[in-house]
Image (cartoon, rainbow, N blue to C red):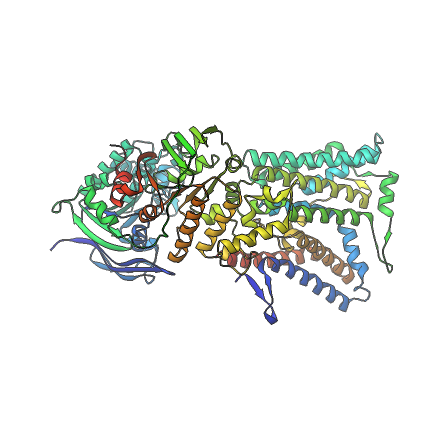
């Protein structure tokens, strides 16, 4: 009889309209490193939120047994009390406090309400030694790099006497040295008896470190592989992650491809929060008129960062590279420049960056194209209304009138408003970042039809998507991005999910 | 729920609800006053509120622009005082004519606003801090000009102070009311019909989206503080018509009255929604509270503050409910 520290059985989690998890089973053996793999949106994070009590007991179906007891966590405090600690991709440290203060935050070393600083710093020092962090315990966390901040998080977990440590994409933001150090540390913790669950997109790390892998796809567990007994390769994991058939979800389309519209050469962008790190590294892309080009990459590959930095330097610092429009070099310094040069960018987070949710449809549609609707600063409201009416009809926006507030519309209709806004600026190049995220199937088909129509009008379209079937069904050509570098370019007939996934995960060998 | 249902299937868009609430409140106060006090329910009572609060209305218009972008301007009261001080000292001392002094005062106010707006935009500092510094600076500058009240005896100013513009049926207003009305109409027009106005609403609604829509967010922010500075200076000029003096202690705490008027008028403090009409109603409500208390006679003027305080609580709660619903 094997000793399982964690058994999750029959976990089903439903959000309004969507089944995020369906009958998921996960068993983790004590003292092992267990990896969870799956595409973006497969349900990995949801599963971890169920486990850690972010979604409290009662909001999901199924049972959790941890360390021999049946669990009904009402919140994160409960799960931490039981010995489960989760470290998220976005670290949860208080940047202006010292390492020692962060480690014991909420769990202070105090005597009768007064903090014992000597003991705090002494014990912090011991924990830091365990995770291999050579710093003074009084150093302020914001002075540390991401790699060391990660170690602080782990030290904090150790201070809570953790039994099961969950790491969500722990190496996504780390460089190679820091990643290697972190993986060594996890092996060391395993040998001390701490069980680890690691969610990772980097399959080479998974095969290197994990003792077992569970693959999740579309909210279901596909299989659990044991590294010792099964023959597990990266390709084996990939086929499990993507193995679903393409069905008829895409309108038929034949592209008529014309001249080059936009070329980006040797584009490099540095992270604004860590100026030393390259988020996009020497990327080159070409988009032609009438063509739909895909950009594939896993989370953290730099897709959005690439698009936003091209679109008027809306992201990143220390940007270098060349942009050619219709064969001529152009300079884009601001978003206004980008719009003037015929670029449009529909963001992946339309609620935060794409729309003014408290404003109505017509004013959202006109926002980027106001210069065409106004003369010497005065807006022609009649024309604005007429334009909005036209889009209301042609884009089939389901809303009572163009004066309806955008925040109340469904995701699909909001996206149609975003697209209308950009079409009004008469762009030559449209960059659509996750155009169908959070949109139901029927509305997706409509969005695909609109994208095809834009290409037929001779516009170049770049589609960024985490859904590989979408890229395969929609695009004439697909670029893959991994860790900021373009790692491949496949025409539609050569592209398969497996090949794309290989290029997206392996990087340049 | 985006609309408020009325009987017979007619609906009002949710964004008009706070303004309508303020309008109903004003009407109710007016009716209650009319029932309780003899000679209250006349048109002149409303006009008197305008006459006594023309300067506040002008300042509140500028504040509306700032709050619509999601900012705040704490310097307005001090700029009003500084304006009265500059005007009074230049006219009484060197004897400069009003047609030089008034434009100069407006220029100083706008310039102060411009500098604060530039600091807020260029260094990405919270408006609260920058305008707080502006508030101390302007108030301090008043005392470098003089610590005593300086009377204004210029004939143009006294004419402005004493003229009664007769309307129909024994109703009258002062020239200040005309100035305030022009400011309100122009500002409403700018907010509603110009690209600057659109950029103001869009910046307040979501600054990040506005940036990615290619709207000139930076320029808009500088512009609203400049407008607020201009309105404060103009409010100062109008106040000196009313007071016929310049004094460093004029308009103490007025920034808070202006903010209160804007909020009671239904403009969201986080920006993005609100109307100038609401601000006008907000000023009227504040003014009418004072009128009612003066009719009451026995109550001390501190009751004004108490009522304003309660009203503010009520309106902020209303806005909270409203914005919680709209953020689905």
Left-right relation of A295 to A359: left
Quarter holding residue A459 = top left
Residue A500 at x, y percent in the picture: 28, 41
A246 in relation to A328, above or below: below
Quarter holding residue A227 = top left
Residue in view at x 20 percent, y 43 percent: A235
Left-right relation of A326 to B313: left
Please state the total of marks drawn on the protein image. Answer: 0
Residue A201 visible in rendering: no
Left-right relation of B98 to A16: right
Q: Residue furthest bottom?
A: B8
A217 in relation to B136, above or below: below
Q: Nearer the viewer, residue B170 or B16?
A: B16
Residue A264 at x, y percent in the picture: 41, 32
Residue A363 at x, y percent in the picture: 57, 50
Residue A366 at x, y percent in the picture: 56, 47
Residue A414 visible in rendering: yes
Q: Nearer the viewer, residue B78 or B55?
A: B55
Quarter holding residue B285 = bottom right
Left-right relation of B252 to A224: right
Residue in view at x 50 percent, y 57 percent: A408
């Amino acid at each position: 009889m094997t000793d399982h520290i964690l058994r999750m059985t029959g976990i089903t989690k439903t959000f309004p309209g969507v089944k995020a998890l369906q009958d998921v089973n996960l068993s983790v053996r004590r003292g092992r490193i267990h990896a969870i793999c799956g595409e973006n949106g497969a349900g990995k994070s949801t599963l971890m939120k169920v486990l850690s009590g972010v979604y409290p007991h009662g909001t999901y179906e199924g049972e959790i047994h941890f360390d021999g007891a049946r669990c009904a966590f009402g919140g994160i405090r409960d799960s931490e009390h039981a010995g489960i600690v989760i470290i998220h991709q976005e670290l949860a440290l208080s940047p202006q406090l010292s390492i020692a203060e962060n480690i014991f935050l909420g769990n202070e070393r105090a005597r009768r309400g007064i903090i014992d600083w000597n003991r705090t710093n002494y014990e912090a020092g011991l924990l830091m030694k365990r995770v291999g962090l050579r710093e003074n315990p009084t150093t302020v966390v914001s002075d540390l790099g991401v790699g060391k901040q990660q170690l602080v998080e782990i030290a904090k977990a150790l201070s809570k006497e953790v039994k099961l440590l969950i790491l969500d994409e722990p190496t996504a933001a780390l460089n190679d040295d820091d990643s290697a150090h972190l993986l060594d540390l996890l092996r060391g913790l395993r040998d001390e008896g701490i069980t680890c669950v690691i969610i990772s997109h980097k399959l080479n790390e998974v095969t290197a470190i994990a003792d077992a892998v569970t693959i999740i796809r579309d909210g279901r567990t596909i299989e659990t592989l044991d590294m010792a007994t099964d023959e597990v390769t990266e390709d084996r994991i990939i086929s499990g992650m993507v193995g679903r058939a393409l069905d008829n979800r895409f309108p038929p389309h034949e592209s008529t491809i014309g001249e080059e519209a936009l070329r980006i050469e040797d584009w490099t962008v540095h992270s604004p929060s860590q100026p030393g790190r390259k988020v996009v590294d020497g990327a080159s892309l070409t988009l032609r008129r009438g063509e739909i080009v895909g950009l594939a990459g896993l989370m953290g590959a730099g897709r959005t960062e690439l698009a936003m930095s091209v679109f008027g330097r809306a992201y990143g610092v220390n940007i270098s590279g060349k942009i050619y429009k219709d064969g001529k070099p152009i300079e884009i310094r601001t978003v206004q420049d980008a719009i003037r040069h015929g670029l449009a960018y529909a963001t992946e987070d339309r609620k935060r960056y794409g729309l003014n949710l408290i404003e109505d449809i017509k004013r959202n549609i006109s926002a980027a194209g106001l210069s065409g609707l106004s003369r010497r600063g005065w807006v022609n409201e009649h024309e604005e209304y007429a334009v909005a009416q036209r889009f209301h009809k042609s884009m089939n926006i389901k809303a009572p009138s163009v004066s309806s507030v955008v925040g109340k519309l469904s995701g699909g209709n909001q996206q149609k408003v975003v697209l209308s806004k950009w079409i009004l600026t008469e762009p030559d190049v449209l960059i659509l970042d996750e155009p169908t995220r959070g949109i139901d199937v029927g509305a997706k088909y409509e969005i695909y039809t609109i994208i095809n129509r834009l290409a037929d009008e001779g516009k170049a379209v770049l589609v960024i998507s985490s859904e590989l079937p979408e890229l395969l069904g929609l695009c004439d050509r697909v670029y893959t991005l991994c860790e900021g570098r373009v790692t491949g370019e496949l025409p539609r007939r050569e592209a398969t999910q497996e090949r794309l996934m290989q290029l997206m995960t392996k990087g340049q060998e | 729920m985006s609309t408020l249902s009325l009987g017979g299937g007619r609906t009002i868009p949710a964004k008009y609800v706070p303004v309508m609430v303020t309008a109903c409140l004003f009407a109710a106060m007016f009716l209650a006053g009319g029932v309780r006090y003899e000679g209250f329910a006349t048109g002149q009572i409303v006009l008197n509120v305008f006459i006594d609060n023309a300067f506040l209305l002008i300042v509140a218009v500028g504040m509306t622009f700032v709050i619509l972008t999601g900012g705040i301007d704490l310097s307005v009261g001090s700029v009003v005082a500084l304006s009265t001080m500059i005007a009074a000292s230049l006219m009484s001392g060197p004897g400069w004519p009003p047609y030089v002094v008034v434009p100069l005062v407006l220029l100083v106010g706008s310039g102060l606003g411009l500098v604060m707006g530039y600091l807020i935009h260029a260094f990405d500092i919270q408006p609260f801090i920058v305008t707080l510094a502006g508030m101390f600076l302007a108030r301090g500058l008043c005392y470098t000009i003089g610590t005593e009240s300086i009377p204004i005896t210029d004939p143009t100013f006294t004419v402005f102070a004493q003229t009664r513009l007769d309307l129909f049926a024994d109703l009258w207003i002062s020239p200040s009311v005309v100035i305030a009305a022009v400011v309100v109409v122009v500002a409403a027009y700018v907010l509603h019909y110009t690209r600057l106005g659109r950029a103001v609403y869009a910046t307040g609604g979501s600054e990040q989206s506005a940036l990615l829509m290619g709207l000139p967010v930076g320029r808009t922010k500088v512009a609203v503080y400049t407008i607020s500075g201009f309105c404060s200076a103009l409010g100062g000029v109008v106040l000196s018509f009313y007071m016929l003096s310049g004094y460093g202690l004029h308009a103490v705490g007025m920034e808070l009255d202006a903010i209160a008027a804007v909020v009671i008028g239904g403009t969201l403090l986080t920006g993005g929604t609100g109307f100038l009409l609401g601000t006008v109603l907000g000023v009227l409500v504040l003014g009418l509270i004072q009128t009612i208390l003066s009719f009451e006679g026995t109550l001390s003027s501190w009751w004004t503050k108490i009522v304003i305080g309660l009203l503010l609580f009520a309106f902020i709660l209303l806005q909270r409910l409203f914005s919680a619903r709209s953020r689905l």
